[in-house]
Image (cartoon, helix red, strand yellow):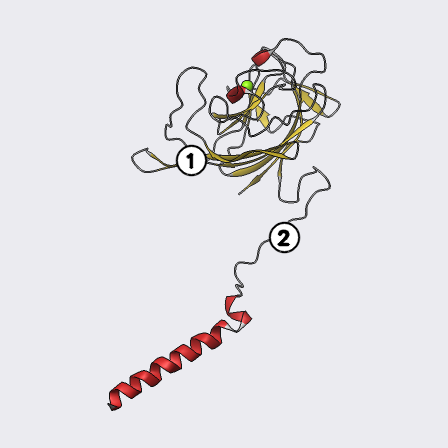
């Protein structure tokens, strides 16, 4: 009888303590970690912790895939594809990032479908978010502007007119592989096009393929960002990245 009452008292005591703890607001306050301070830029200007990839003056952060200097043309704070010279890529490799860039399709409309204002942003040198003049320019939707090329159709078409500057704010999460080379966590991407959410944390199926299905092949944790020369006079400016 005595044992029972001690047990009962103990239970009652614990119950009371728990109820009391729940009524104290400090119990659910978390003090670590304290986020580092980042000073935001005005408008689309880079925040204080960004790595500037192109500020309108030079392509020192970029190169041709063979290591030669990037030959695209800089004019009025923008860099324009020099058709036929090939893609350019960052010298630095990146994994999980937030990327901001601005792009512009030529004002003088030439061609249609995939042949109008085509370029692209390849994350890790292999996963393409499409750049295309998709303003009143039908093509297969999984290949239009802001698509994950031939994988994910954007939620909406937020394209501005040709000749106008457009923004991409992209959050890219690199794929993870196990020791055997199998993908354990596919890459993911969120794309905000001109302030409009168009890809909401979508899964990437593998390396971008023009023909056939995408697959994953194990690669390094950090790889360059590549911009595509698709033969069109697409321009870029204000490119910056934050490593996550
Ligand atoms: Mg492209």
Residue at (40, 31) in percent of width and height: 219
132 relative to 222, above or below: above
**Left of 202 or right of it: where is 177?**
left
Label drawn at residue 37:
2
> Of 2 and 134, which appears nearest the observer?
2
Q: Residue furthest top?
A: 111
Assign a secondary structure to mark 2: loop
Viewer can see residue 85: no
Is 168 in front, or is 139?
139
- The picture places residue 29, in percent across and down from the top left corner, at 53, 65
Q: Which mark is residue 175?
A: 1
Choose between 199 and 224: the one closer to the eye: 199
Depicted 174 relative to depicted 125: above or below: below
Q: Residue 173: image x %, image y %?
A: 48, 37
From the viewer's side, name the closer residue of 215 and 54.
215
Q: Is residue 239 left or right of 5 when viewed as pictured? A: right
Q: Quadrant of residue 63?
A: top right
Name the residue rendered at 46%, 25% in the picture: 151
Indicate the position of residue 78 as horizontal and vertical percent values.
70, 24
User: How many marks can you see?
Assistant: 2
């Amino acid at each position: 009888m005595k044992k029972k009452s001690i047990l009962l008292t103990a239970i009652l005591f614990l119950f009371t303590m728990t109820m009391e703890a729940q009524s104290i607001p400090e119990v659910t306050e978390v003090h670590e970690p304290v986020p580092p301070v980042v000073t935001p830029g005005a408008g689309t200007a880079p925040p204080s912790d960004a790595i500037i990839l192109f500020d309108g003056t030079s392509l020192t952060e970029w190169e041709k895939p063979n290591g030669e200097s990037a030959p695209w043309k800089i004019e009025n704070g923008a860099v324009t594809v020099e058709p036929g010279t090939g893609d350019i890529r960052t010298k630095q490799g990146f994994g999980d990032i937030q990327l901001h860039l601005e792009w512009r399709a030529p004002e003088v409309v030439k061609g249609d479908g995939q042949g109008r204002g085509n370029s692209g942003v390849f994350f890790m040198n292999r996963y393409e978010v499409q750049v295309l003049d998709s303003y009143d320019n039908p093509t297969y939707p999984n290949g239009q502007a802001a698509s994950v090329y031939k994988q994910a159709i954007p939620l909406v078409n937020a394209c501005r007119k040709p000749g106008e500057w457009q923004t991409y704010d992209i959050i890219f999460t690199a794929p993870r592989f196990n020791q055997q080379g199998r993908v354990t966590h596919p890459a993911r991407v969120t794309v905000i096009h001109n302030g409009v959410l168009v890809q909401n944390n979508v899964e990437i199926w593998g390396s971008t393929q023009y023909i056939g299905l995408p697959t994953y092949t194990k690669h390094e944790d950090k790889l360059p960002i590549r911009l595509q020369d698709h033969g069109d006079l697409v321009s870029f400016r204000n490119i910056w990245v934050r490593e996550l």
